[in-house]
């Protein structure tokens, strides 16, 4: 690639050390003398004026710089974007061969694919493009064109959360939500409806964990807590579980869950309830389940509320133990990126101590390999899935 034009705005770091992370916070940079619009491609130099890299600038955001390349020969342009997207698609299709198992997988995983501020998910012929950065939004035409080159005829649906648009200072006018589509995973069919208020009704990051749990749950009585669209329960029943119950507060998503069970010819008892109330009732009735999955939604985006999130994880896991007999299985998950794996496992240790139960950790997993994590961005490993045996 040709060198970036010399006219790029220059952003100077306060330190002469190379950042150890592609995110550079506003307190780490010198304020530029002239206004640089949010999302601009800039050249970054250290405190001594030495070249550091190129990336997106946003003086209004907490993440002031998103470093994209440390190669002075690389331009951050439409061609660079297309090359990174091609690399991401090749990883999934050629190395991981995801098309063998599913037509629902993550195409681009932000920093994990070197495309900070961009996530793309595939659901059959729908590509869902989520923008987290003004710089990526400025390249939207190049992004969409590159994606359609790899997925000819795909329907594109793009959006950005309102809080992201406010933080990053851009106005993302998305397309109309596409019609729902059926996706497939390990031979089973599921409903996906991007943009209709329930995310997609399908979370591809748990693909491998659903299959592993189903294998362990053969012949067992399954309880799927915070079941969303019922993926774990449906997989378990299809693999030979004795029976399954799913519990969630969202009546709308439970209708999707029931349709998923019907589409796969399995019977699951889906119930609308708060899981705390439901579990207390189950304990009072003396009910037990020898394979339990607990997969709540993200509990916080605020670093100041991580302790509160851990207290809630403690409470729900502690209550779940009361319906698991000795020798039972627990798969407990956290998709709260701010909660580290170490803190989540420490929470489980305290749960076991409080309950007077022994918890054996069988396997600690995360998202599937279509969610690669860059070595210097541990935040990318947001999902923790801990397979346990409870005595």
Image: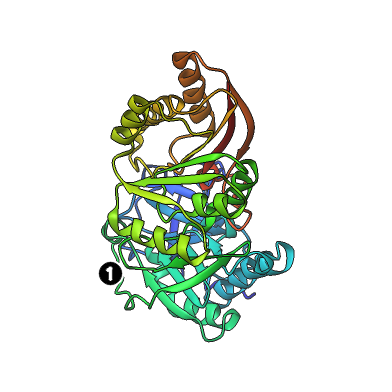
Q: Is residue 149 above or below residue 174?
A: below
Q: Quadrant of residue 112?
A: bottom right
Residue displayed at 55% across by 42% down: 378
Asked if one can make out residue 382 in the rendered structure from this viewpoint, the answer is no
Q: Give residue 271's position: percent from left, percent from top.
A: 34, 47
Q: Tell me the quadrant of the picture where the N terminus can be found.
A: bottom right
Q: Quadrant of residue 318?
A: top left
Q: Residue furthest bottom?
A: 153
Q: Is residue 341 left or right of residue 35?
A: right
Residue displayed at 51% across by 45% down: 243
Q: Give residue 168's position: percent from left, percent from top.
A: 32, 59
- 237 vs 135, nearest the viewer: 237
- 55 vs 326, nearest the viewer: 326
Q: Is residue 132 above or below residue 249?
A: below
Q: Give residue 311's position: percent from left, percent from top.
A: 36, 26
Q: Tell me the quadrant of the picture where the C terminus can be found.
A: top right
């Amino acid at each position: 690639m040709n060198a970036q034009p010399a006219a790029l705005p220059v952003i100077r770091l306060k330190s002469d050390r190379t950042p150890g992370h592609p995110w550079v916070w506003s307190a780490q940079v010198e304020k530029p003398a002239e206004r640089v619009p949010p999302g601009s491609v800039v050249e970054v130099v250290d405190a001594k004026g030495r070249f550091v890299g190129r990336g997106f600038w946003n003086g209004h955001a907490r993440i002031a710089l998103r470093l994209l390349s440390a190669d002075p020969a690389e331009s951050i342009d439409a061609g660079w974007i297309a090359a990174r997207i091609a690399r991401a698609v090749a990883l999934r299709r050629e190395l991981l061969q995801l098309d063998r198992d599913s037509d629902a997988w993550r195409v681009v995983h932000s920093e994990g694919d070197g495309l900070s501020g961009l996530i793309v998910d595939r659901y059959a012929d729908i590509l869902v493009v989520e923008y987290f950065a003004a710089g990526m939004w400025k390249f939207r035409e190049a992004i969409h064109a590159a994606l359609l080159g790899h997925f000819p005829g795909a329907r594109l649906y793009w959006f950005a959360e309102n809080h992201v648009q406010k933080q990053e200072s851009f106005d993302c006018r998305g397309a109309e939500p596409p019609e729902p589509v059926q996706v497939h995973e390990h031979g089973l069919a599921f409903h996906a409806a991007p943009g209709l208020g329930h995310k997609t009704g399908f979370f591809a990051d748990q693909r491998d964990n659903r299959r592993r749990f189903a294998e362990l749950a053969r012949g067992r009585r399954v309880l799927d807590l915070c079941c969303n669209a019922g993926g774990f329960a449906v997989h378990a029943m299809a693999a030979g579980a004795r029976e399954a119950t799913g519990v969630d507060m969202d009546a709308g998503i439970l209708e999707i869950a029931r349709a998923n069970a019907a589409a796969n010819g399995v019977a699951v008892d889906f119930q609308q309830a708060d899981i705390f109330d439901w579990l207390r009732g189950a304990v009072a009735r003396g009910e037990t389940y020898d394979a339990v999955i607990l997969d709540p939604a993200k509990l916080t985006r605020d670093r100041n509320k991580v302790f509160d999130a851990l207290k809630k994880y403690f409470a729900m896991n502690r209550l779940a133990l009361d319906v698991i007999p000795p020798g039972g299985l627990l798969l407990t998950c956290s998709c709260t990126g701010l909660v580290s794996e170490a803190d989540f496992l420490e929470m489980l240790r305290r749960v076991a101590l409080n309950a007077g139960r022994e918890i054996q950790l069988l396997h600690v997993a995360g998202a599937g390999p279509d969610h690669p994590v860059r070595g210097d961005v541990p935040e990318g490993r947001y999902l923790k899935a801990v397979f346990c045996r409870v005595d």
